[in-house]
Image (cartoon, helix red, strand yellow):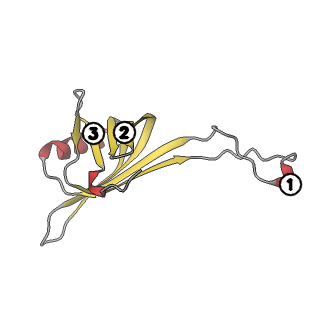
């Protein structure tokens, strides 16, 4: 993967009608993929070294982003999803790498701002089902 600009990472939420709305003004974002370990170490493990059971751990993804709202559509959609406890589909686009897509729940949504600056938001998403990955050319 060649060097990419961080600002090119996009977070998109389902608009509820088959399309996606880009979260406006995202200045920083982070995508984490995790896999839990299942310890399969036993009395017969070679020299008592830990052994892990391949493919048995729970997989999860966490996404976080911070920025400013520049349009009403993404702000309204995120608030509605959070307060309803929905798990809509999201697209997470990493230029030069791929697109991660699937259901996520908003687990944190906050706003902040200084008296001499713009209002900012912060959002954290946790995966809520099977995710797909499509590599970008």
Sequence-wise, the earlier of marks 3 and 1 is: 3
Q: Residue at x 38, y 53 (%)?
A: 2
Give the farthest residue toward the bottom. 116
The image shows residue 70 at horizontal and vertical percentages of 13, 52
In the image, what residue occupies the spot 67% across and 40% down?
Answer: 54
Residue at 33 percent of width and 47 percent of height: 95
Residue 83 in percent (x, y) is at 28, 43
Tell me the residue that label 3 is attached to. 13
Provide residue 38's location: percent of width, then percent of height.
67, 44
Which comes sooner in the sequence, label 2 or label 1?
A: 1
Quadrant (top left, top right, bottom left, bottom right) of the C terminus? top left
Marks 2/1: CA–CA distance: 43 Å
Asked if the residue under mark 1 is in contact with the one under mark 2, i.e. CB atoms within 8 Å, the reply is: no
Q: Is tag 2's residue or tag 3's residue first in the polypeptide sequence?
A: 3
Numbered circle sitting on residue 136: 2
Q: Which residue is mark 1?
A: 47
Residue 81, given in percent of the width and then of the height, sits at 27, 40
What distance separates the C-alpha of mark 3 from that of mark 1? Answer: 49 Å
The alpha-carbon separation of the residues under discs 2 and 3 comes to 19 Å
């Amino acid at each position: 993967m060649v060097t990419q600009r961080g600002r090119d990472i996009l977070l998109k939420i389902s608009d509820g009608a088959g399309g996606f709305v880009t979260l406006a003004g995202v200045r920083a974002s982070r995508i984490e993929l995790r896999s839990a370990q299942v310890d399969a170490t036993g009395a017969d493990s070679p020299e008592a070294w830990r052994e892990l059971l391949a493919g048995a751990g729970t997989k999860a993804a966490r996404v976080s982003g911070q920025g400013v709202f520049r349009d009403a559509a993404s702000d309204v959609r995120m608030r509605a999803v959070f307060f309803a406890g929905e798990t809509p589909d999201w697209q997470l686009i990493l230029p030069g790498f791929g697109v991660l897509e699937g259901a996520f729940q908003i687990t944190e949504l906050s706003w902040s701002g200084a008296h001499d600056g713009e209002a900012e938001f912060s959002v954290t998403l946790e995966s809520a089902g099977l995710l797909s990955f499509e590599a970008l050319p």
